[in-house]
Amino acid sequence: LAALIGEKGEVACIPFVPGAATSIMREQGFREEIKSYSSIKLVAVQYSQSDVATAMAVTEDILTAHRNLAGIFAANEAGTLGVMRAIKTRGLAGKVKVVGFDASDDEVNGLREGLVQALIVQDPFKMGYLGVKYAVDAINGKEVSKRVDTGVFVVTRENLEMEEIQRVLHPFP
């Protein structure tokens, strides 16, 4: 998001549910990284409650309160979809840069339409494979790490058709 907005301006974060571990980690990671940019100011954090309509409403509120908003990070699918709707309704596609999380068909279509500039996408095949592998290891008495990084991909219009990205978006053709 920082690169998309030229490393300056006002940004907002839309996590999904207060208290949910993944929501906390995504919000915390965003907050920590944004702090490293002295010309970027985090002006709003509003929860979507993992609901598209709520995400749209909080995005509308943020856009009303912060007319110079440069970018938004939406931390899950529902948040991203709600942000996309608000951006489209206001005619702000491409003007307010959006980075979303996950890769539903609607989110990918939003990327193609320019409503979202990037999607943070996990590798579902690798997550499943390693989950089973480590479960078997645990059953067999092997030590298993408490945290396993399965990696993420930043999907943009520019790399959307790359084979590696298509494999992540459609792991089971």
Image (cartoon, rainbow, N blue to C red):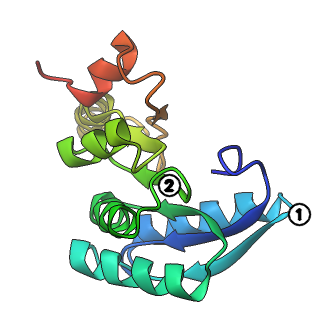
The quadrant the C terminus occupies is top left
Q: Quadrant of residue 61?
A: bottom left
Residue 45: give x, y in percent of width and height: 55, 80
Marking on residue 98: 2
> How many callouts does the rendering have?
2
Residue 86: give x, y in percent of width and height: 35, 70
Please, is residue 97 above or below residue 18 in the view? above
> Image check: 79 left or right of 27?
left
Distance from disc 1 to disc 2, alpha carbons, whole Å, reads: 20 Å
Q: Secondary structure at mark 2?
A: strand
Q: Nearer the viewer, mark 1 or mark 2?
A: 2
Residue 165: give x, y in percent of width and height: 37, 22
Please, is residue 15 above or below residue 97 in the view? below
Query: From this viewpoint, which residue is outermost toward the top?
Result: 163
Residue at 43% in and 53% down = 100
Q: Quadrant of residue 111?
A: top left
Marking on residue 57: none
The residue where tag 1 is placed is 38
